[in-house]
Image: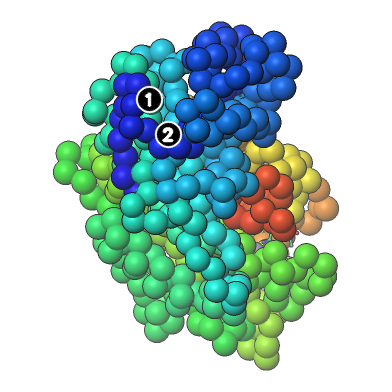
Amino acid sequence: MHFAIHSDTRGIADAVLIPLGTAEDQRAAAWQWLTHRVDVPVASLEAEFDGAYKSMLVLFGKDGKRYVLAGIGDDTAPHRIVRALRYLVLRKRKNLGPGVAVWLGHVGADELEAWAGAVAYGMGLGLYRQELLKTDARTPFPLESEEAALQIVHPRAGDELREVLQLQWRLAQAMHRTFDLVNTPSNIKTPAWLAEQAEAAGRRASFEVRVFDEDAIEAMGLHALRAVGQGSAHPPRFIVMEYRPAGARKKVALVGKGITFDTGGVSIKPATNMHLMKSDMGGAAAVIGTMEAAAILGLPVHLVGVVPAAENAVDGRALKPGDVIRSYSGKTIEVIDTDAEGRLVLADGLAWAVRRHHPDLMIDLATLTGSCIRALGTEAAGLFTSNDTLADALFRAGMATGERLWRLPLWDDYMEYLKTDVADIKNLGDKPMAGAITAAKFLEFFTDAHPAWAHLDIAGTALANGDFSRDRAATGFGVRLLCRWLEELA
Ligand code: BES
Ligand code: ZN
Ligand code: ZN
């Protein structure tokens, strides 16, 4: 992809995109610019195009160019621009030639960088192909070709904007890989495969990746991870990534649940929708994706990414309800329900991260509970922390990126639900309520009371139905949120 900045329309591509919100001033500026170019009265433009999200109007210009109006909606925050351009390119990419010019003449100079970056990122996401495993040969879209060009048209744009476009395009390509991690089916996606993907990300973006196999997991004392993986033909892996930029003042550990498939184990899940459990490594994908994006952005924060990866399967060696297992922390766990496996592997990931790395801050992400989906639906992920400053910073990053979080309590009263006579803790609350909170309390037990730890339950947000896919597909939830939070932190 080539990027170019044009101050007027001389020499630009034949397809001109005009992203517009519903705001009066944006649309008025566009109509004024269009009057010399198309033979349509302003009243008709007003009537035919209102700028609502997903709305579109294609006009043929007197100059032979195609002018494509693309609606963003009422809110033109960057993540809304991203969504609108992604939708447009996804739905229209077959019709887009190798050159696309985007007119942003209605945008003030102070906002231009944000708009142009969001346009490039959204268009880059729009080119994502989910159909990797379809067998019908498919020729690349012109916009994917080597000579494809993205041009920004603005009267006062400087050439430095090109770097912004390049960077955002690269981030979009990295996000494609994050989507792939989640969308890949579990006959391919084993713990070893996930580890290889982390290694590939490390090579692309230059961060360090170490992978520990079954024997190493045993030797390191990651007993809970080993126990969850023991019923699978695909043995577990413990993946550790490290990005260490010069001048970093803070060290952040990111821990992601990496269950490559969750059958539930002996406490087996119902068949309906079980196929979606290939996405039970959405937390791991967010961590790997954030490592890559942070390295691309050059964020000045020392990051340690930890992914305990296992398949929760059923066979003669699988964990059974009632088993008592050890964990890296030394604490014992009574396994009441083998389907509450995420908290088991995270118990080891969190304890290992705290004891081996002493991070200043630690965030874990996990598709952890159906309970969280029942509480918040698919509109927000659950946020759990006892640290108000951290809660506030994460919440704000969520609102700014559209990856919203909503806080739920972590009061000690909930710890009562997890008490047992036979071990230090049990993995399922004894009341059929507050499941997302008791899961978070379970995790907290393995953080050595870390003062700046937060848990994000992304069970409802890792997959989305709708605008960008037919059946539920990866959202990459967490990557943009964490990058934003890390930027603010640094
Ligand atoms: N991976 C699931 C949680 C989940 C459910 C994620 C639906 C995405 C969509 C997790 O391992 C699980 O099975 N949780 C159980 C916990 C219960 C046994 C305490 C749940 O939420 O039902
Ligand atoms: Zn489960
Ligand atoms: Zn699970």
**Which residue is identified by label 1?**
9
**Which residue is identified by label 2?**
101
Which dot, 1 or 2, sits closer to the camera?
A: 1
Give 49 or 357, whichever is nearer the viewer: 49
Q: Position of residue 354 (x, y in %)?
A: 38, 53
Q: Position of residue 260 (x, y in %)?
A: 57, 70
Would you say the residues marked 1 and 2 are in contact, meaning their CB atoms lie under 8 Å apart? yes
Give 236 or 70, whichever is nearer the viewer: 70
* Residue at position x 43%, y 82% in the image: 214
Residue 216 falls in image quadrant: bottom left
Residue at disc 2, secondary structure: strand
Q: Position of residue 179 (x, y in %)?
A: 53, 57
Give 214 or 301, whichever is nearer the viewer: 301
* Residue at position x 60%, y 29% in the image: 59
Q: Residues within 10 Å of mark 1 (few under 14, many from 20)?
A: some
Q: Residue furthest bottom?
A: 316
Q: Is residue 422 above or below residue 448?
A: below
Residue at disc 1, secondary structure: loop
* Amino acid on which the number 2 mark rests in the picture: Ala
